[in-house]
Amino acid sequence: MSILAKRLSAIKPSPTIAVTQKAADLKAAGRDVIGLGAGEPDFDTPDHVKKAAQDAMARGETKYTAVAGTLALRKAIVDKFKRENNLTYTPDQVTVGCGGKQVIYNAIMATVEPGDEVIIPAPYWVSYPDITLLAGGTPVFVECAETDGFKLTPAALEQAITPKTKWLVLNSPSNPTGAAYSAADLRALADVLLKHPHVWIMTDDMYEHLVYDGFTFATIAEVEPALIDRTLTMNGVSKSFAMTGWRVGYAAGPLPLIKAINMIQSQSSTHTSSISQAAAAAALNEPMDFFEAWRAAFKARRDLVVKMLNEAEGLSCLTPEGAFYVYPSCAGVIGKTAPSGKKIESDSDFVTELLESEGVAAVQGAAFGLSPYFRISYATSEKALTEACTRIQRFCASLK
Ligand code: PLP
């Protein structure tokens, strides 16, 4: 009898972490590799946030906290939701986890039973389906075409809803496409959701601040307040404050749901680090003065990458509204043959051959549920991006 539980066979390791690891292994073996797989900002956590962590340690805030998170942090989150999203929550309606990922995990574990369906627009962030499967639920993928800007349409949503639907997961700006839903886009989806009161909405707003060209971020409970009683509004400090390693994510929603999430957390991690919580509170309470420079850097990188990818033979790339990813189509190279003699039959072949011949690590669209595309993270220097895109152009030109 195997020691391993059967539920493990339903899931796989994160493919984005796998690509990052493969690139690191090749680098360690002496290969000249540019990694465009990682989903984290290359900036450092702002100094005032680090200082808040040091101060918390000096004050002795090194003990257990409340399972839901410290009151100071939950108050900072309540203020943030009011100030930035016009959403009214009480501290009891807020939960803090070890990153946004654990908050989503807790929420799905607390609510999804075998037979329950979770609508996941594709392309999607890689963890939604696997967490759903671990809970015994059924992911229902809805393909969102490039011609729709990789966004869920109201008609497609309507079609996907069944009596078994428990959640709709909405992620804007999106990992992996960078697509973001405007208030009007969300209004149209809300009109469908109002007709189906049994469907709950999990909004993953991790990339809220990472929007460009004057795009105005919106979240669904703000656009349609009638949905607030069945919406879990999830967010975190990982991406907006370059705090991926601190492991702080949070969500707010109806009290019974938040209590259930806290129950799961109380029997797993208990809470995230007390020091990280103090740092996150400072991040949310202090002005984001540093952010305009980051936004300008990300926008310049996005524009550079989109331009260079569109110059590559056989690739085409939309200009996304946000996040730090682009999701170019490689349809134009499918069927061609790489210098190694390998025929490119899929986006997985494309990224494998690209890594082998030019040392550029990207992630195949198949990992995110929509092919033939690949994801590039542009959270790295313009110098590295220019070199990577030059190599991609050279690789595409070498295909016969
Ligand atoms: N949601 C999305 C869309 C993400 O891209 C990520 C991280 O890659 C997360 C959630 C998880 O964030 P965290 O590092 O806070 O767990």
Image (tube, helix red, strand yellow):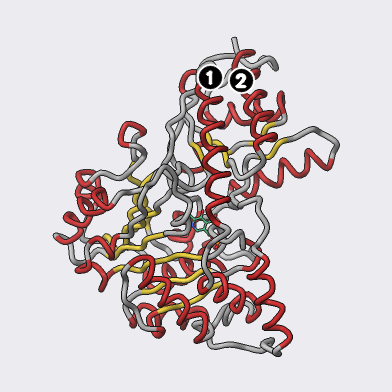
Up the image or down, 43 lies above or below 50; here it is: above
Disc 1: CA contacts within 10 A as few (<14), some (14-19) or many (>=20): some
Up the image or down, 102 lies above or below 146; here it is: below
Residue shown at 71% from the left, 47% from the top:
21
Label 2 CB-ligand 1 distance < 8 A: no
Q: CA distance from mark 2 to mark 1?
A: 7 Å
Q: Pick the residue in front: 53 or 250.
A: 53
Image position, residue 101 (x, y; %): 52, 63
Q: Mark 1 sits on what residue?
A: 311
Residue shown at 59% from the left, 41% from the top:
378
Image position, residue 247 (x, y; %): 60, 68
Earlier residue among tags 2 and 1: 1
Q: Name the image quarter holding the C terminus.
A: top right
**Number of marks:** 2
Q: Mark 2 sits on what residue?
A: 393
The kind of residue on which mark 2 rests is Gln
Question: Is residue 333 visible in this depiction of the protein?
Answer: yes
The kind of residue on which mark 1 rests is Glu
Residue shown at 35% from the left, 69% from the top:
232
